[in-house]
Image (cartoon, helix red, strand yellow):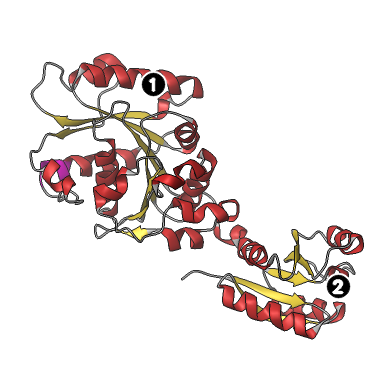
Amino acid sequence: MQQIARVVVALEANDLAEEVMHFLDRSGSARVVGTAADDRQLTEAVRQLEPDAVVAQPSLVDRGSVRGPAVLALDTRESVSSLRAAIRAGALGFYLWPGERDALAGATAATLAPAHVGEKRAVVVAVHGARGGVGSTFVATHLAQALARRDLDCVLVDADPTYGDVSAAIGVPDDVHTVADLLPLVAELTPGHLDDALWSHPAGFRALVAPAAEQAVLVSGEDLVAVARVAATASDAVVISLPRELGERAIAVLRSADRLLEVLSLDVLSFRAATRAIDVVTPLGLPARVGFVVNRSGRSEITPGDVERVFGTEPLVVVPADRSVPRTQDRGRLVPPRGRVGRAFAKLADRVLESEGP
């Protein structure tokens, strides 16, 4: 269950204190556990209740009454004296009531971030296809399914806000949350915020999908990295579906990933595009994290063995061609885990988990 910040409200005016208290309680981001009308009451409330945050009139916290919780200064008007008092108290922010109450609610939620976002625990796998049509979205979605079948809490992130193929590939409804819904919170993102935005797939993994096309330009690489970082602290595995173009967004995500899976098809153009992609990531020090996946393997002059000849390493897995896949994808469904394709992804999941990269 999502936790919310425990707050003490310290304001001299009783009417104002009640307004703030009711607003925070209704916001869903905080629960007011105590109030104070002077610095002595505030000191005692903090000592007894150990809140996550104190929302207070600057003059009260200026007297040294708060030790420990985050301080958020609140006043009905801005003055030099109140701003100075807030600075001396070490307040994380100064908010005017009622005009900045929404920002205040967001700041109270952010005081929980240190308690929730700890050290990374998930393996983060980025999936990329340098040539269009090689099936990188297919690999990302089916890898997420295979990881979930290992009883792992797996989060699938669509990091291609321009095209957002993941939604169609796994049959996501139109009314779910997207990456764009997290943008106002991205600087203060917690696992609780992320949980609210994730859509649960019947196969057992959860997905954060790309926004509507008109919102794609709003999503930056830093935003996607923040999402991936929080997901990695609250899950066992994160699979990120990258855009084909290795631009700012993709590079930012790659820097934070443990593994990069480069998806190939058995043709010259795919090998050539993958070679160029590796040339792009080489200056970033990423080649040691790269593994290759051959998708839709069938009869061809180029064989899976040519992967080692060209790239110096054998593919992690070879996914066989299956005539039922296009029909299944068109319906927004995943290929069942039983069968040759399913077994290939089970092997890929094992290979990813065996080595999480340097």
Compared to residue 42, the image places residue 296 above or below, namely: above
Q: Magenta region: which residues?
A: 339-343
- Give the main secondary structure, helix, strand or loop, of the magenta stretch: helix
Horizontally, residue 334 falls left or right of residue 75, namely left
For the image, the number of numbered tags is 2
Side (left or right) of 186 relative to 293: right
User: Is there CB contact under 8 Å for labels 1 and 2?
Assistant: no
**Residue designated by label 2:** 60
Where's residue 346, x and y in %?
21, 44
Residue plotted at (58% across, 69% down): 29
Q: Which residue is found at the position 18% from the left and 46% from the top?
A: 329
Residue 321: give x, y in percent of width and height.
Answer: 11, 34
Tell me if I can see residue 331 in this picture: yes
**Left or right side of 325 for 261:** right
> Which residue is nearer to you in this view: 208 or 180?
180
Residue in the foreground of this view, choosing between 302 and 273: 273
The vertical placement of 88 against 60, above or below, is above
Judge the density around disc 1: few (<14), some (14-19), many (≥20) Cα neighbours within 10 Å: some
From mark 1 to mark 2, how far is it between C-alphas?
A: 58 Å
Residue type, numbered disc 2: Leu
Q: Tell me the quarter of the image containing the C terminus.
A: top left
- Kind of residue at badge 1: Ile
Residue 146 shows in this picture: no
Residue denoted by label 1: 278
